[in-house]
Every structure is written in structure tokens, then in C-alpha cells.
Image: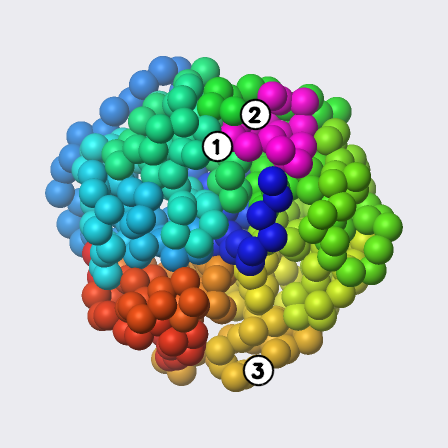
């Protein structure tokens, strides 16, 4: 049965650390050819050739994040010592610490040791999950597994990481609401988890990873809410899965969303853009891609509230966008000058912005190298400073956390879940 409640996926964008969040988050994407995010690299740390290369935990000096990933109400980070840390909501064990306790500040996923190349996060509301690509090219996941999205061969939730079966030489992974996809260093795409709307294409779905047939090799994948988009090596963008809001990018037969229209589903990849695209992102009911001439989006447009398919809206900025990510109610893009743009519900404006505007930080510690957008205008950024710094802003849905605190920002402070946006940004300690 299709769930029509609002579901948000939280993903990130970046250009400095190779394959940063854009490859490993919910609604993920990559930058191809213009900033050097290639399939065999992760976070500035090349994927080792051959088999396993287990990193020993050594004192890395100043500890800082090099990559971010998040879902609706939890966030994870890869640190410079190859460890993974998570914080926020933990109802399904998505923080990986062996329990279901909310964490207001980052805690280490100790079971992964110092072997992490990148992390990813996905899932709806508090029923979420996380994955990590390890230095040896394997993937481990934890959290909600009600649709087999952990790839463990079963549908049992896990409070600590478990290996994804039948998967190796992975360059990147992207987590959607109930399904996950990965791109290998050879450009093969694999998907697993729910396939109720065709989001795994010709892969059968369920708890075992299986290949997806594409015309060309994949460079990046973006798993959204019951749909998937892929950026291929030729720069084209292909999508498949649920299309009741036009999120696959072809005519849905209506100008409004129709969640019960299963006939609009697309179960085989269809070409949406000839490109050349440099990144692709997928979120709740929206997808976007960056091209040389700007950002193009389709599906339920943010903030316009209308269905746009096929892609026809080109958003312009004062600088070239190299990566973009769609949240539930806002979208952010990172420019080649390492500035951050926002449209939709943006905190610095206090309202709805129809065209991209620069996010004005009062005293930024350095240029922005990554950004993440999610539920309730929640955004995190990674600043390139002498010690890279993570700062976040946003809020929590009062209905999701009724009468409780908002755990999502990571600075250790409990705030009421009142739906109000926290601004200016707060710093996340590691």
C-alpha cells in the first residue's frame, strides 16, 4: 500500500571531498568531470585497489568531519580518521550504537572501527536507516529493515551494522525511503529493498542486492521516495519508479499529485535529460540535476507546489551550480565559488523564496564545501577551515515529536519540537 503521509529524505551536496555526501546520502548525487567526483573515490580518500585495506585507529590529531549524510531526523558523518559518527532520532537504531536512545550530539558507530570511506542515511520520519561504504569497497547498514533495505538477506531491524550481501567494489551508495542503490567502481548499479512502485527497476527488490540494467555505466545514483534517478557516464539522466507527481520526469497525466495513481509508475529506466548533467538528486517528490546552463528540476516543484514534467524549469544563479539537493520544502545548491544558494523555505528569508538566493552567513569560518537539506528546512553545511567545521540549522515537526524535544541539530542542546527554525547555525562538536 502506498504511503501518502509526508516523507522526507535528507541528503547532502559537495565538491571538495570526492564522492562526498552527494554519492552516499538519501537523494544522493555526484559531480562529474567539473570538480572531480569520480566513481572510484570517496571523500578525498581514494578507494583502495584490490581487496581489503583495514585502517587502524590512530590519533589523527584534530578530529573533524570530511563528509555528511542524513535522513529526516538523524545525521551521520565520516571523520578524517575514517570513523563514523551519528546523532539525532534513533527509534529504529539508525545511529548504530546498539540501542534506540536519542542522541543530541554525535556518537561513534564503534562497530565500524576506522574503516569508513563514507556514510549514507535514509528513510521516512523516525523509521530510518544508515549505511557505510568501507575502505575495502563493501557496505554495511543498520536501522530499519522492514522492506529489506539493509540488504542483509532478511527483514530484521539491526541496532548495529550488518553487511550488505552480494555487493563489493562499491564506490557510492544512496538511500531512499525504503530502498537503497549502489554504484560500483566499474559503473554497475545495484538496488535492493522495496520495489512496490518499480523503484528498483528490473532488480527484484527485497533484502538482496541485484543489478539494474542501464544503457550505459552509472556514474552516480539518487534514491528518492519510491523512485530512483541515475547519472550515467555519458552525462544523461535516467529515472524510474513512482511518478504520481511527475517525479520520474515524464508526463503523469495530471497537473496535481495523485498518490493513488499506480498506473503512472515507470518500472524501467527512461531518459529524462540528455545532459551533459554534472549531478542529480532525488528527495520526497522532487528531483533536480545540474547542467552547464543551470539547475533543472521536475516533479512536485519546491516551492511552486505544481507538477512539472517533463523537466522544463531552469533556475539561474549568479554563479555556476556544481551540485544540488532537494529537501522536503526547500532546495540548496553549491556554486563553483563555494557559495550556498537556497530556494523554497529558507531560514535567512523567513518565508518562501521562488528563485535561488545566496545564504548569508554572518561570520563564516571558511568557504562551504558541502551542504545538506532535509525535513523542516533543516540544513547542515561543512565549512573548509583550518579544522573543517559542521554547522546546522532548522527545526523539527511538532507532529512527529509531539510534546518532545528536537534531536536533529547535533549541538547537544534539547530544543522543543515546535516546527520553528533555529537560525543562526549551531556548531556540531566531534
Residues under numbered marks 1 and 2 in contact, where contact means CB atoms less than 8 Å apart? yes
Residue at 62 percent across and 44 percent down: it is 2
* Pointer 3 residue: 351
* Nearer-the-camera pick, 39 or 107: 107
Query: Is residue 325 in sight in this rendering?
Result: no
From this view, report whether residue 211 is shown above or below residue 392: above
* Pointer 2 residue: 205
Where residue 353 appears, as percent x and y from the top left, is 63, 78
Which span is picked out in magenta?
A: 186-204
Residue at 82 percent across and 49 percent down: it is 252
Query: Is residue 189 in sight in this rendering?
Result: yes
Q: Secondary structure at mark 3?
A: strand
In space, the residues marked 3 and 1 are separated at their CA atoms by 37 Å
Q: Per the image, is 429 magenta?
A: no
Mark before the other along the chain sequence, 1 or 2: 1
The outermost residue toward the left is 59
Residue at 25 percent across and 24 percent down: it is 54
In space, the residues marked 1 and 2 are separated at their CA atoms by 9 Å
Where residue 97 appears, as percent x and y from the top left, is 21, 41
Quarter containing the C terminus: bottom left
Mark before the other along the chain sequence, 3 or 1: 1
Quarter containing the N terminus: top right
| Tag in front: 2 or 3 | 2
Where residue 186 appears, as percent x and y from the top left, is 56, 21
From this view, report whether residue 316 is shown above or below residue 42: below
Where residue 261 appears, as percent x and y from the top left, is 76, 46
Mark before the other along the chain sequence, 2 or 3: 2
* Nearer-the-camera pick, 122 or 387: 122
* Pointer 1 residue: 147
Q: Residues within 10 Å of mark 3 (few under 14, many from 20)?
A: few
Amino acid at each position: 500500500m502506498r504511503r501518502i503521509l509526508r516523507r522526507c529524505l535528507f541528503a547532502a551536496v559537495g565538491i571538495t571531498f570526492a564522492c562526498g555526501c552527494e554519492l552516499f546520502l538519501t537523494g544522493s548525487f555526484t559531480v562529474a568531470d567539473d570538480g572531480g567526483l569520480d566513481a572510484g573515490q570517496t571523500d578525498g580518500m581514494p578507494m583502495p585497489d584490490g581487496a581489503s585495506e583495514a585502517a587502524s585507529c590512530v590519533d589523527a590529531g584534530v578530529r573533524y568531519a570530511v563528509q555528511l549524510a542524513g535522513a529526516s531526523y538523524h545525521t551521520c558523518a565520516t571523520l578524517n580518521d575514517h570513523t563514523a559518527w551519528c546523532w539525532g532520532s534513533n527509534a529504529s537504531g539508525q545511529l548504530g550504537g546498539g540501542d534506540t536512545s536519542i542522541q543530541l550530539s554525535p556518537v561513534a558507530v564503534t562497530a565500524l572501527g576506522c574503516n569508513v570511506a563514507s556514510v549514507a542515511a535514509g528513510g521516512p520520519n523516525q523509521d530510518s536507516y544508515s549505511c557505510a561504504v568501507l575502505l575495502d569497497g563493501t557496505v554495511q547498514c543498520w536501522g530499519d529493515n522492514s522492506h529489506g533495505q539493509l540488504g542483509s538477506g532478511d527483514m530484521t531491524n539491526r541496532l548495529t551494522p550488518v553487511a550488505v550481501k552480494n555487493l563489493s567494489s562499491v564506490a557510492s551508495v544512496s538511500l531512499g525511503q525504503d530502498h537503497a542503490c549502489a554504484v560500483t567502481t566499474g559503473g554497475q548499479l545495484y538496488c535492493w529493498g522495496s520495489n512496490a512502485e518499480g523503484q528498483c527497476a528490473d532488480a527484484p527488490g527485497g533484502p538482496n542486492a541485484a543489478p539494474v540494467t542501464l544503457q550505459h555505466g552509472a556514474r552516480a545514483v539518487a534514491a528518492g521516495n519510491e523512485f530512483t534517478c541515475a547519472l550515467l557516464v555519458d552525462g544523461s539522466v535516467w529515472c524510474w519508479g513512482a511518478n504520481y507527481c511527475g517525479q520520474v520526469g515524464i508526463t503523469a497525466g495530471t497537473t496535481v499529485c495523485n498518490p493513488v495513481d499506480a498506473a503512472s509508475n515507470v518500472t524501467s529506466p527512461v531518459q529524462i535529460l540528455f545532459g551533459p548533467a554534472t549531478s542529480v538528486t532525488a528527495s520526497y517528490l522532487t528531483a533536480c540535476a545540474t547542467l552547464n546552463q543551470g539547475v533543472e528540476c521536475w516533479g512536485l516543484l519546491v516551492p511552486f507546489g505544481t507538477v512539472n514534467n517533463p523537466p522544463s524549469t531552469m533556475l539561474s544563479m549568479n554563479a555556476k551550480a556544481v551540485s544540488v539537493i532537494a529537501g522536503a520544502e526547500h532546495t540548496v545548491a553549491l556554486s563553483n565559488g563555494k557559495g550556498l544558494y537556497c530556494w523554497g523555505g529558507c531560514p535567512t528569508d523567513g518565508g518562501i523564496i521562488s528563485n535561488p538566493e545566496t545564504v548569508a552567513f554572518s561570520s563564516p569560518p571558511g568557504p562551504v564545501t558541502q551542504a545538506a537539506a532535509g525535513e523542516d528546512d533543516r540544513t547542515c553545511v561543512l565549512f573548509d577551515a583550518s579544522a573543517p567545521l559542521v554547522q546546522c540549522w532548522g527545526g523539527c515537526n511538532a507532529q512527529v515529536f509531539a510534546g518532545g524535544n528536537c534531536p536533529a541539530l547535533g549541538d547537544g542542546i534539547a530544543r522543543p519540537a515546535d516546527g520553528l527554525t533555529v537560525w543562526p547555525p549551531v556548531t556540531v562538536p566531534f
